Image (cartoon, coloured by chain):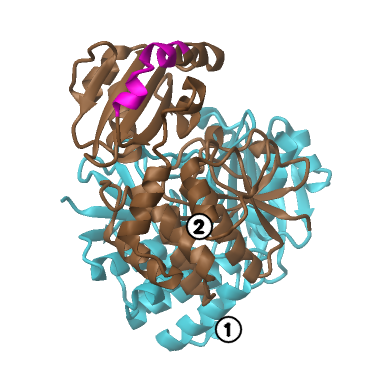
Chain colours: A cyan, B brown
Amino acid sequence: MSKVLIFGHLNPDTDAITSAISFAYLQKQLGVDAEAVSLGEISEETAFALDYFNVPAPRIVETVANETKQVMLVDHNEFQQSVADIREVEVLAVVDHHRIANFETANPLYYRAEPVGCTNTIILKLYKEHGIEIPKEIAGLMASAIVSDSLLFKSPTCTEEDVKAAKELAIMSEIDLAVYGLDLLKAGTNLADKTPEQLLNMDAKSFPMGPKNVRVAQVNTVAIEDVFNKQAAIEATMLKEMVENNFDLFILVVTNILDSDSVILALGNPITAVEEAFNVTLTDNKALLKGVVSRKKQVVPQLTEALS
Amino acid sequence: MSKVLIFGHLNPDTDAITSAISFAYLQKQLGVDAEAVSLGEISEETAFALDYFNVPAPRIVETVANETKQVMLVDHNEFQQSVADIREVEVLAVVDHHRIANFETANPLYYRAEPVGCTNTIILKLYKEHGIEIPKEIAGLMASAIVSDSLLFKSPTCTEEDVKAAKELAIMSEIDLAVYGLDLLKAGTNLADKTPEQLLNMDAKSFPMGPKNVRVAQVNTVAIEDVFNKQAAIEATMLKEMVENNFDLFILVVTNILDSDSVILALGNPITAVEEAFNVTLTDNKALLKGVVSRKKQVVPQLTEALS
């Protein structure tokens, strides 16, 4: 059997990268010839975590069918968020915490999804179910993912299980969650020297919503003005990407991780669906969304509803 | 919150009915106001199991949105195998052992699929994970489902986990698997007094395969001639259902549970895909498939491949 490749979504965030690493390690202990790979460059936040725990970044792949017949997906299932040639390989397993859509298989598979805040919270359960011990550095990466996905437990996606898992993993990896967690989040907020292309692709996903193809990018910051100083250039790049990729709507969510609020920048059609979804009026294409930090719970369902 | 309805697929078999019962009991112990319901009449095999363990049959529903907003699916996920108004309710959870296709949600959910032979094998794990004790009669129904889905462990879908689970459940429910199991299977093979409509709907599922809509019905018997004595009438009914429901191909799989072989009866277009899928020549629309007993592993993937 060829090697089984394990990967998270395109534009990988910390959970996408570390869940590939943690799930691949588990699979190897279970006898699978598994390798964690990445569908894109790692973020500065993820680099901070990998450096801290001295784990090398997974190699980047653009396609998989050229080297394997079988893959496992973590932190995603929708094919448009996956590797370009996903339909040419067999998906053996999925571990995820998102909605299920645009996903199908020819054969029965292992699929484990739970409505928790982070894929690594589920992977911790899988380690326990199989009685496999977690190495200190893997536990540290798993804790990092929970901090990242939950914005240090402030996101509405965060469940009690995530908090409990993070505390347990922090003990295993000998970190102080509050101190390490804030350092980790801040490492991902250095936006001042990013180009508009980089900003818009740090953590961006596409979603079919009704008849529309919607792009939702998100960046975290401690200073929202660092982003909007470049608003004109960002808008020009958004329009370019919309034309090139047939996005009907493009929404950039700029989240202040200290205040737990977001400002959105939205372009496209129907723009009224954006105003309706969040009950706001866009001014200069922007609106403040008080208390909004989660794309999954506070942005995507509302947009889906408004566009359906 | 309104009651959460839990159900298996249309044309329910023993696993569809009993996994709804066993998963609903588990959910009730976890505090969910759950009720197992059925999407159709129970089979004689299922009736045998329910009578034996003195458990009432779930009530039959045709729609669910009229009485609840939230459901859980067992033993299926494909919407065309589910309740007619499935898109009008929220799917909170799925426990299944089939491929995933034609399934999507707006929100994250609990999804537990494993490539094992029976849904109840997975549900047994869930009871253990939650530390919930299984009542004797529920254990008996769960063992019945494993016997039914695996044809007493002869089906290629049967895994070591299924065998182990069935033995454990047999002890809990104080049955002799070999004796009870054969009685159970034979209870489902009384085909002599069935009308063609009844025969074709005892255990039938529809599958989108490439551009085609394929109906695959299966019956178990100890005497294949009991079915083919009525071949002309069965073919007439197949053609009628094909016209009424836009099935491109209709395949009836008649399985001898003692020999572990099947004879198929196939009508429709492209009929050559059926011959190609199983590497046989149809004579009088029929062909013997040696060693074939599993629709899921030995019929559907081969047809899907031939039609893609």
Q: Are marks 1 and 2 on the same chain?
A: no
**From where the camera sits, is residue A180 visible?**
yes
Give the residue at x 31% y 39%: B294
Q: Which mark is residue B151?
A: none
Q: Is residue A299 left or right of residue B93?
A: right
**Residue A102: x percent and y percent?**
50, 38
In this view, the mark in front (1 or 2): 2
Disc 2 designates what residue? B52
Q: Secondary structure at mark 2?
A: helix
Q: Residues within 10 Å of mark 2 (few under 14, many from 20)?
A: some
Amino acid type for the residue under numbered disc 1: Ala
Magenta-colored span: B224-236
Residue at 37% x, 46% y is B185
Q: Nearer the viewer, residue B61 or A66?
A: B61
Viewer-side residue, B126 vs B47: B47
Closest to the observer: B84 or B18?
A: B18
State the image quarter where residue B143 is shown: bottom left
Quarter of the image that includes the C terminus of chain B? top left
Question: How many numbered circles does the render carry?
Answer: 2
Residue B228 covered by magenta stretch? yes
Q: Residue furthest left?
A: A1
Secondary structure beneath label 1: helix
Tell me the CA gap for discs 1 and 2: 58 Å
Farthest residue, direction front:
B193
Residue A125, percent across and down? 45, 72
Q: Chain of mark 1?
A: A
| Residue on which disc 1 sits | A178
Please identify the dominant SS of the magenta region: helix
Residue type (three-letter) at the residue carrying disc 2: Tyr
**Residue B163's quadrant in the figure?**
bottom left
Q: Is residue B75 visible?
A: no
